[in-house]
Structures are given as structure tokens and as C-alpha cells.
Amino acid sequence: MQNELKWRGLELLKDGAVDRILGWRAGQFVYDITPDVFTDPEDLEKNFIYNEFCGANLSKYLIAESAKEGKVAVFLKPCDTYSFNQLCTEHRIHRENVYVIGIECYGKVSVDALRQRGIDGITGIRSEMGSLKIDTIYGEESVPAMEVYAERCRNCKSKKHVVFDELIGADGEVVDDCDRFDMVEKLEQMSAQERFEFWRGELSRCIRCNACRNVCPACSCEKCVFDNPKSGVLNKAAADNFEENMFHIIRAYHVAGRCTDCGECSRVCPEHIPLHLLNRKFIKDYNELYGDFVAGESVGQMSPVADFTTDRDAEPSVVQKGGDQ
Amino acid sequence: MMYQIPMESLDRLLAAIAAQQKLYLPTDNTAGEAVYTEWTQGAALSKKLNTLRSAKDFFFPQIQNMAKFRREGKKIEVIDDRAEADDFCIFGVRACDVRSFDVLDNVFLADPVDTWYETRRKHATVISLACTRPGETCFCHTFGIDAAKAGGDIQCWETKDTFYLEPLTEKGQALADALIAADGELLTQCGADQEALVEKETERIHKILEKLPLYDLKAEDNRERELELFRSKKWKELSSHCLGCGACTFVCPTCQCFDIEDFNNGETVQRYRCWDSCMYHDFTLMAAGTPRLTQTERFRQRFMHKLVYYPKAHDGLFSCVGCGRCLRKCPIHMNIVKVMETLKEEKE
Ligand code: SF4
Ligand code: SF4
Ligand code: SF4
Ligand code: SF4
């Protein structure tokens, strides 16, 4: 697929149809790929890459890219298109400056998953019929690709592009029978104490590097309150571990109804904290309380909690009476 | 003097050290990453290449209380509430992290000495461990670090059946002596044959290192090119997609910046310091604002500091030790190796 993407990118650049291409730049190894903008066809030809490690969701970069002059083409995987729509709904992307190329996706591999299996010293990776052949300085390894996909890909929620100007590869369907809520259900079935301990355990590893927040397409505030000394809640250091944990709960509330479950937070967390479970709990609750709602499914849709209606709201009396009465 | 102990008696060795002083070693956490934890009976030494967070935490913790101030009428009382530190031992430190202590020492132990750091450092004994399985992200060799001879107070090797220890400093020898005094059977002195086996293991590791993809990476002395590199156009491209998250600085064993803040509850003020990151927009924020307005300038600071400013101030010593943590943990895979390569191109 890489060649198709590259060829199309070159064509768009050379025709002058777009001024820039937002894609992925090859690195030192097969997996250390950096999101980047290409303006020079020669550079694109030489350094553009598309493979099973192009997990990064490029949508958030369009906040800055689409605000610039000229047109930018972007490659979006199905799950990335939800983030794109959501950002358009929030008026963060100038849609008219973006040309969306939807690309087919079979799932992306997590290097961490390879390392967890003790695979290290990686020098090359090839896909062969559903399995990955990994060259390392210690010899060759082979693993079923499905087993080392990122969590969000193992539980892919949709192969459908909710927005595109053109497609490379086929469009798929929403995956109705995906298992993404299984773990949430397990957590729901725990006692409050067990659940508390589960989260205390997971969140206690946090080093507060802010990678989860900074990569998140729903976290697009210019300046986070927790970074702002004037906000009164500056949180450069937490007083204790519990306060630290609360950061994540607060963040999950803040993105509820806007989080598309793109899975970037969990992908980038150096401590492998399953942040997506917090978001999925909200998604599941929304679905149960307000009827199915998918953030980013279309542009302009309102999240149920931002759009009160007496017939749908879980506690209509609040809407009828108003706040403090 | 070198000592040995059979691999299956490693637990006995750890228990013996723990009987002398608090012992920390890398163990696997629930997420499958190695982290330093306090030794308890049955704790297994991690097989991972390196810990997720570096060993700098021991001397320079992420959050540290510095002093308390209490006001009573017109008097302000300053309370130094530091507890007396006990001796402790860090086991299994890799060569890169051992070098990182030199980098940190140059800063925290220089005049004016940082007494918080100094106390922790004085009480610590560092037991290092040669790397048996370096990864593709390792480039300690670039900075003249030998992964097969890890340094510290006692340096160790683990082979299939034997664990070797070599005290290098007085502190290390004192610990070895104390271990022997407590249990005469624990450690056996190595003869010439065994020392030759250690030499062989060292060579084996060197052969692996030579196969690493970054083995030939050269760190150039750029002290003379400070201004030229500072003004380079490349920073903009390199930093253009950096998220400004700070993951790279928090996992880095040599990043040393901190912020000092006061928490005022009306009666007492708690003064604390916490890690800061030059990747953050409020880094070195002053009344007049911040001197680095864009992510490009913040990004440049991180790498100029590692590759130019620090070497300039410390006799050419780089403040990167090639541990590879930032290569593994950056969400967008931007890192110091890519920066070094790009700056080199600039010169060509
Ligand atoms: S990415 Fe992980 S470690 Fe970093 S702040 Fe988020 S949860 Fe914490
Ligand atoms: S800059 Fe990266 S490779 Fe160098 S010491 Fe820091 S984390 Fe390790
Ligand atoms: S200036 Fe940046 S690179 Fe240097 S020690 Fe501080 S945080 Fe690390
Ligand atoms: S270089 Fe990477 S890890 Fe460091 S701040 Fe930028 S995105 Fe985060």
C-alpha cells in the first residue's frame, strides 16, 4: 500500500492540488515513524513510509496545519476519521483547507507488544500471511500479527471511514461485534473496593509525563488548566499519589462525549496504563443512558450531555426545573 | 579482587545485602516493565534490558519537599524537616545509568552543593550489572561507555551459571567485606581461570554491541559550533510534530531540571521541588514571561543542552548516555539520534 499512497501524494503535490501532505516519515528502524508534513516531492519519494507501525493518528495535527495558508492532504485510517469529524464539530479544523484521503487498515502493530515477548535488538520486520517475521541481532522470530496488534486494533470498532474526499483501498463496516467493552464490564462487576484498587494500582504507575493528554485529539485546549499557574489548580506536582490519580478521572470527564476511542492515550503511555478503559466506561454509559451515540460519527452532532432534552435525559427533572431550584 | 557466586544462589546474595542495608533492584511490574523496587524475600531480578524510569530517581526524586515555613504573628519559622538518610544499595544498574550519575554529580555536587542530592548520593552503594542482551536502541558506545564493564561501586556480570562481582571503590569493597564477615561461605574469590571467563563474557558482549544498528553513531564535538547550531534551520523541521509532552525528559537518566514551588495552606507553606521539562511551555517561566516562546525553541533547548551546552561546561562530557529510553518512549519517535544525524547532515 505504501507505493499507492506515495504515488497519490506525489501526484497531488505535482498537480498543485494541495500544498502539503501530512503523513509519516521513516526513521532509523522499521518502527520509529514520525508524523510529518511533506512539501517537496523528492522528499516524499525518499522518506515517506506506510507500514504496520503507522499507528499515530494524524487528525490532531490538522488543528495547526489547516490553519495555515494553502491546502493540506492527509492520510486517515478509519478510526482517525472519527477524530477528524469530532474536531470539525468543535470548529478546531478548517475543513476547506484539508483534503482527506481515507486509507484501508488491517490493524497496527505495537512494538511494546513485541518487547513484552522478549523480542529485542530488532533490525527488520516483514509481514507474511498474517504473521510477522522479525529479524533481530539475536536471530529471527515469528509471531502471529493479530497477537501483537495494539489493543485498539485487536478490538477495532470500525473499518468504516466516516469522512473522506477520496479512498485508497476499500471502505469497511462498523464492527458491531467488537469486544471493546468486555473489560469495562468486568470492572463493573467488581466490588467498589476491588475497582478502586484496580485503578489505584494502574494509575499509581503514572509519571505524569502528559503524553496521554498531549496526544489526545479531544484535549485541544491551548493551555491546560493544570499547566496554568494562574488557574489555582496548577498541578506540576501532585501532593500525593491520590491527587495524581484524580488527574486522569478529571481528564476522562473532560473528554467524555467527545472522545472517539481512538486509543492514542493508551498507545503512547510509557507506563502502559489502560486509559482507554476510563473513556470506554463513559461511552458505554452514554449508550445505555441516552441511546447509541458515537462521537465523531458525523459533523455537527451534539454530545448527549451537551444537548439536554427532556425525553432523553436520564434525569429530566433537572432539565425541567433548572439548576439550583 | 573478584568474587563469584553460583547463579542459583543469587537470592542468597540479595538477602545478604538486604541484611546490611536497604536494597533496591529492578523487578517486573504488572505492566511488564522493569522498575526499581525494594527487595523483599522472593523478589526476582528483572530480565529486562533496562528499567523504564532511570535510576536518577534515587538521588533526584520526581517530587521532594525542601522546607516548611510557619508564620506566628510577626515571626516566620523555617523548618527543615528532612529525616536522616540511611545507607542503601541499588543493584543491577546498567552502564549507561552509572555514567548518568557522573553527569548529575557535575551539576548537583558543584558549588553550591545541592545537599538533598548529596545526602542521598553519599548513602548509596551502586552495584552495576553488565548488559547481556543490548537492544537496537542502545548507543552507549557512542559516548565511550562500556556496557560490558558497567562501573559503579561494585561491577557485576551474570552468565548462565555464575554471578561475578568486582568491587571498584572503597565503598564497594567495604560492602563486600561486610558480606564476607557476615557469611564466610557466600562469596568465593575468583582465580585466574574464572577471571578469564569474565574476560570472555566481556568479549561476547562486545561482539553483540558491534552488531547494534547504532554502533557506528559518532557524537561530534560541537562546542565550537554553538551559535551556528543554535541558529540552524533544522530545528523547525525536527520539532514540528513534537507534542511537547515531556515523556522524553522524564524517562531520561540525565535530565536534571526542576521547578521549585510553594504550597500555601494559609498557615504553613510547603516548599517543594519537582521535575520540570524544557519541553513544557511554562518551563523557566518568569514574571516577564518565558524565554522560549515556541515548541521549536523548547525542543532545541533539550538537544542543545545534551549535545552542546553541557559538554561546553563540563570538559566535553555529553549529557546523553545513549540509554535509548527516549527512542523507545517518545510517542512520535523523535529523539536524540535523529537530531544528531540531522545536525551532521547540516555540516556536509
Ligand atoms: S501518558 Fe501515562 S504516564 Fe504519561 S501522564 Fe499519561 S497516564 Fe501518566
Ligand atoms: S537523551 Fe535519550 S538516549 Fe540520551 S540519556 Fe536521555 S533518554 Fe537516554
Ligand atoms: S534543559 Fe531540558 S534537556 Fe536539559 S536537563 Fe533540563 S529538561 Fe533535560
Ligand atoms: S520529543 Fe517526543 S517525548 Fe519529547 S516532548 Fe516531543 S513528543 Fe514528547
Image: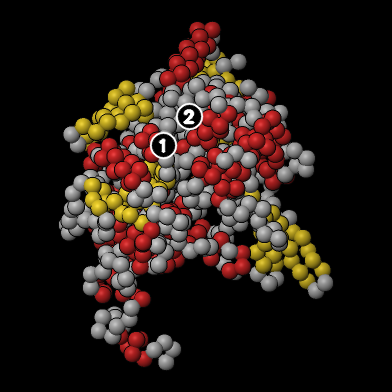
The one of A260 and B83 positioned closer to us in this rendering: A260
Q: How many residues crowd around disc 1 within 10 Å: few (fewer than 14), some, or many (20 or more)?
A: few
Tell me residue A146's x, y (percent). Answer: 23, 41
- Look at the image and tell me in which quarter the N terminus of chain B lies: top right
- Identity of the residue drawn at 73% across and 55% down: B80
- Look at the image and tell me in which quarter the C terminus of chain B lies: top right
Q: Which residue is mark 1?
A: A43
Q: Is residue B156 above or below residue B338?
A: above
Q: Is residue A126 above or below residue A81?
A: above
The one of A135 and A74 positioned closer to us in this rendering: A74
Tell me residue A264's x, y (percent). Answer: 37, 52
- Identity of the residue drawn at 35% across and 68% down: A89
At label 1, which amino acid type do we have?
Answer: Asp
Instruction: Report the chain holding disc 2.
Output: B
For numbered disc 1, what is the local secondary structure? helix
Q: Quadrant of residue A26?
A: top left
- Identity of the residue drawn at 40% across and 67% down: A91
Residue sticking out furthest to the right: B74
Closer to the camera: disc 2 or disc 1? Answer: 1
* Circle on res. B110: none
Q: Are marks 2 and 1 on the same chain?
A: no
At label 2, which amino acid type do we have?
Answer: Cys
Q: Is residue B139 left or right of residue A142?
A: right
* Circle on res. B138: 2
Q: Is residue B78 above or below residue B111?
A: below
Residue sticking out furthest to the top: B192
Q: Is residue A174 above or below residue B92?
A: below
The one of A95 and B316 positioned closer to us in this rendering: A95
Q: How many residues crowd around disc 2 within 10 Å: few (fewer than 14), some, or many (20 or more)?
A: many
